[in-house]
Image: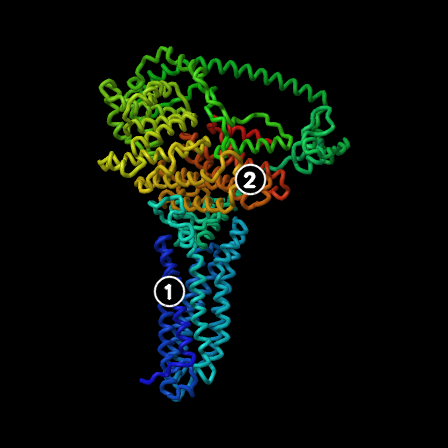
């Protein structure tokens, strides 16, 4: 067969097949990202694969047609049979070309349906999809059967009649595709601009989702090139149309794939280990499919806050470089809706501001602040501190008011009388309180012996009631004198300095540091206990087997479910022999059961209790004797971990930090930090798994107590074998990743000064890692967000605790990373959106805690655990509120404190350090 290849044919083939390669590369990268990184392939992914098939068919038909003369004029071909065969093949290629363009537009539309929530916007997209499907199929058929007989469509030698002018159809189809491109490119801006995101993030995400505008430009050029359909030199004049048709389809797929490829870019940019999970961890990122609010729990929550994103939690701002653009937008949309609901709820409950006193100076009135002036002074304290003129407006005349309201300003003599009366009442109340305190202290001395005899007859299954020892309530918890940036007291100190700078004196000092008490201070209490007549009674037998079993069950539910480093069921089996025959049991078994019982009593008593203290007095000297034995085994490590947890629930977090530091060194001594020594020393798989859990629980608690006290870690990441096995339990694996993330954040936050000098790129990267960790939480451990009606009325108690803890930790670490936005007025002015994000995260934390306290007893059982998150959130809100007073452009942040009173009104906050109670005094200002 003679070949008519030539003219523009070689150039046409080269362009088309290069575009096929580019098309295939983007489709391949898209599928790899969705399947291997995001683990979720959607309908739009299947459509782009189908589009790739039609693109290959399109190029194949054109390539075959170039052999018959496509790209050459009729005179150059010379053979009518070859010429009209080329026309036929080009028409077949147009069928494939129309299909690939139409399928590409449909893929973009389905892509947008993932992120759009508004029903009118969804209806708009569906209308375009329906119109695109109809026009695509109609044009694909008409291009072939436009004439009768069909052969006359491409062979003009055959007489026939064309019932439609396809050039007009082509112009209509091309115009429709162009309009679709521009509509799909503009629509994301309407969705994004109302979201609670930084302006830079809005523009970045919107631009990523609006790249289809380039496809629209290509479509305009292709539509103009359709004029070649009516040209006399059909296969020559339509070359531009063939090229731009392929270009439009290729650009469409490229532009729709670029937002999806963000996680792949992050992996390429930062490497596979550039996250908090380490090399061995792999969690699915819940970003694709119709999973409204999956990050909030059970994948059933549309409109939750991440803060992924976001007010959320969801969460989430939305600097989630690991997310694809549509997942960020969907999460931001969820967060924004939840935030608006929360704002509307809060605004309806806000009381009306009272009128300001007319005796305030003009400067204080303008700033809406309390005017403080001592008797006899001519200038108020705030104006004196700020060195501004203090002018008092003349008092209003004493003319009768129109509403006949009586004057409420008392005379000086009446005020003095009222003050004297109030002073007498306060003195009387103080005497009554002192009398009650004396009586209660006398009763408390009798409680230990009474409780020992009463608990002995407690029926099994009915919980005992343990109360905090009143003699220990006056002992302040030990706290380090160093106040680092990870402690909530750090934020309270900055807020206190801000208040003092405005002339507001602190009336009730918050406890920021309490030096550790010397042995001489604590010895009298211990001595009193030893001299009490009940101290000779063995506590476990006096409690009874049933009560010991119950307290072990409490330990299993409250502690073991979160930190599974010990087998409580095995302890329960030994409880009978330990209680009835303690001398016949091994000393370590007795110590373990005593520690578990003491911790359970401390949990129920909400602090140090006489029974728990006597149990610890028996155990602590033995397990803390470092030089007692040359060999340390796994059970001794477990005892030290239990002792650390016990001190935490007694409110002594500094002692918990000390104990977990010893436990960390014990793990190094046993060799749990290296894979080789782990497998050498623990050949049995069961014991090895227990050892792995012990090590990682120690590692997690070491980070937790170190962050709580702003003191150094006991286990350093560089000492841990990168190939060390991680625990199999999903919650514990999440916590290991979180602890590793804490190590990264710790290394970047300076401890000797305010963390204001951290480069922005590092802050963004740490925030990205924090959000990535939030997304890595398995579906069954995602919190069911409480603001939504979809939240179930009942969740398993243990599971609800785990979900809440993971959620709060995600908010906490993000708040810590971003808190520099509210540490100074300069930072507040520099990035108002960043400061608002910090406030949103803190408000979200408080709302979750308030909901938890109102709907379950989980908070009431472990106040020490949850107050850690509460105090950090309150500190951030207080900082934003007080600093915004000094920034005229930041007055909107004053609304940040609207949720503060709701948290402080809960009458059962257990706050040994006084940090939270001190916030109430600040809030009055």
- Give the residue number, with chain letter if any, for mark 1: 24
Tell me if mark 1 has few (under 14), some (14-19) or many (20+) residues whose alpha carbon lies within 10 angstroms of its own.
many
* Contact flag, marks 2 and 1 (Cβ < 8 Å): no
Q: Position of residue 793 (x, y in %)?
A: 40, 40
Secondary structure of the residue carrying numbered label 2: helix
Residue at x 33% of width, y 16% of height: 453
Marked residue nearer the N-terminal end (2 or 1) = 1
Q: Is residue 41 above or below residue 483?
A: below
- For residue 822, the mark is 2
Tell me if mark 2 has few (under 14), some (14-19) or many (20+) residues whose alpha carbon lies within 10 angstroms of its own.
many
Q: Is residue 732 above or below residue 864?
A: below
How far is disc 2 from disc 1 in space, using C-alphas?
48 Å
Residue at x 52% of width, y 15% of height: 434
Secondary structure of the residue carrying numbered label 1: helix
For residue 461, say whether it is visible: no
What is the quadrant of residue 141 in the picture? bottom left
């Amino acid at each position: 067969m003679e070949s008519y290849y030539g003219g523009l044919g070689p150039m046409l083939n080269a362009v088309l097949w290069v575009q096929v390669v580019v098309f295939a590369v983007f489709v391949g990268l898209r599928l790899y990202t969705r399947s291997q990184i995001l683990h979720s392939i959607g309908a739009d992914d299947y459509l782009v694969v189908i589009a790739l098939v039609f693109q290959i068919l399109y190029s194949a038909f054109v390539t075959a047609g170039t052999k018959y003369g496509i790209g050459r004029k009729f005179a150059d071909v010379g053979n009518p049979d070859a010429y009209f065969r080329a026309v036929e093949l080009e028409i077949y290629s147009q069928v494939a070309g129309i299909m690939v363009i139409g399928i590409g537009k449909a893929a973009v539309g389905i892509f947008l349906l993932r992120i759009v929530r508004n029903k009118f916007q969804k209806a708009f997209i569906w209308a375009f999809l329906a119109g695109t499907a109809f026009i695509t199929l109609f044009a694909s058929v008409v291009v072939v059967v436009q004439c009768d007989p069909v052969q006359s469509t491409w062979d003009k030698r055959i007489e026939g009649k064309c019932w439609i002018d396809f050039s007009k159809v082509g112009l209509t189809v091309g115009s429709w595709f162009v309009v679709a491109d521009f509509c799909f490119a503009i629509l994301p801006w309407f969705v994004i601009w109302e979201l609670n995101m930084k302006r830079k993030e809005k523009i970045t995400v919107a631009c990523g989702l609006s790249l289809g505008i380039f496809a629209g430009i290509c479509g305009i050029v292709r539509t103009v090139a359709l004029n070649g359909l009516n040209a006399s030199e059909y296969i020559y004049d339509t070359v531009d149309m063939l090229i731009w048709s392929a270009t439009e389809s290729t650009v469409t797929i490229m532009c729709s794939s670029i937002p999806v490829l963000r996680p792949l870019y992050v992996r390429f940019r930062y490497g596979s280990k550039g996250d908090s999970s380490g090399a061995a961890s792999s969690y699915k990122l819940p970003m694709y499919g119709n999973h409204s609010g999956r990050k909030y729990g059970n994948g059933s929550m549309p409109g939750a806050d991440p803060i992924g994103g976001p007010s959320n939690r969801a969460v989430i701002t939305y600097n989630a470089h690991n997310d694809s653009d549509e997942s960020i937008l969907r999460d931001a949309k969820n967060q924004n809706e939840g935030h608006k609901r929360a704002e509307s709820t809060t605004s309806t409950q806000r009381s009306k501001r009272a009128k300001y006193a007319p005796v305030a100076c003009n400067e204080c009135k303008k700033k809406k602040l309390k005017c403080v002036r001592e008797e006899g002074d001519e200038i108020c304290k705030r104006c004196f501190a700020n060195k501004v003129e203090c002018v008092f407006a003349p008092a209003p005349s004493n003319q009768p008011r129109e509403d006949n309201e009586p004057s409420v300003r008392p005379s000086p003599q009446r005020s003095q009388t009222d003050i004297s009366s109030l002073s007498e009442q306060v003195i009387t109340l103080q005497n009554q309180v002192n009398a009650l305190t004396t009586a209660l202290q006398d009763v408390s001395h009798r409680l230990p012996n009474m409780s020992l005899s009463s608990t002995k007859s407690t029926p099994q299954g009915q919980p005992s009631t343990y109360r905090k020892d009143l003699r220990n309530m006056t002992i302040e918890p030990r706290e380090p004198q160093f106040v680092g940036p990870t402690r909530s007291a750090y934020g309270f100190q900055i807020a206190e300095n801000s208040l003092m700078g405005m002339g507001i004196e602190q009336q009730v000092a918050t406890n920021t540091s309490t030096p550790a008490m010397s042995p001489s201070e604590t010895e009298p209490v211990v001595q009193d206990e030893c001299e009490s007549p009940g101290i000779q009674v063995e506590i476990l037998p006096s409690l009874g087997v049933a009560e010991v079993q119950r307290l072990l069950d409490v330990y299993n539910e409250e502690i073991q479910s979160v930190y599974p480093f010990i087998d409580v069921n095995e302890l329960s089996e030994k409880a009978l022999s330990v209680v009835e025959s303690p001398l016949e049991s091994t000393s370590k078994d007795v110590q373990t059961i005593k520690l578990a019982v003491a911790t359970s009593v401390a949990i129920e008593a909400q602090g140090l209790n006489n029974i728990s203290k006597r149990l610890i007095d028996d155990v602590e000297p033995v397990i803390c004797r470092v030089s007692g034995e040359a060999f340390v085994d796994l059970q001794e490590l477990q005892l030290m971990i239990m002792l650390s947890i016990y001190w935490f629930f007694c409110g002594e977090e500094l002692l918990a930090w000390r104990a977990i530091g010893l436990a960390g060194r014990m793990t190094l001594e046993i060799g749990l930090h290296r894979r080789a020594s782990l497998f050498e020393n623990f050949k049995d798989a069961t014991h090895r798994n227990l050892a792995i859990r012990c090590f990682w629980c120690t590692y997690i608690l070491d980070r937790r107590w170190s962050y709580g006290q702003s003191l150094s870690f006991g286990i350093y990441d560089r000492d841990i074998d990168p190939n060390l096995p991680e625990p199999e339990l999903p919650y514990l694996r999440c916590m290991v990743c979180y602890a590793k993330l804490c190590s990264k954040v710790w290394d970047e936050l300076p401890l000797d000064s305010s963390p204001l000098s951290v480069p922005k790129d590092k802050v963004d990267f740490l925030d990205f890692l924090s959000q990535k960790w939030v997304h890595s939480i398995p579906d069954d451990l995602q919190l069911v967000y409480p603001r939504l009606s979809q939240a179930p009325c009942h969740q398993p108690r243990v599971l609800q605790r785990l979900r809440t803890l993971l959620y709060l930790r995600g908010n906490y670490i993000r708040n810590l990373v971003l808190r520099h936005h509210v540490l100074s007025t300069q930072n507040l002015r520099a990035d108002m959106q960043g400061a608002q994000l910090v406030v949103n995260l803190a408000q979200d934390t408080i709302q979750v805690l308030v909901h938890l306290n109102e709907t379950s007893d989980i908070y009431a059982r472990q106040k020490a655990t949850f107050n850690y998150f509460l105090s950090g959130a309150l500190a951030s809100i207080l900082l934003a509120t007080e600093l915004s007073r000094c920034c005229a452009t930041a007055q909107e942040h004053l609304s940040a404190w609207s949720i503060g009173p709701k948290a402080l009104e809960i009458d059962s906050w257990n706050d040994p350090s006084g940090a939270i109670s001190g916030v109430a005094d600040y809030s009055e200002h």
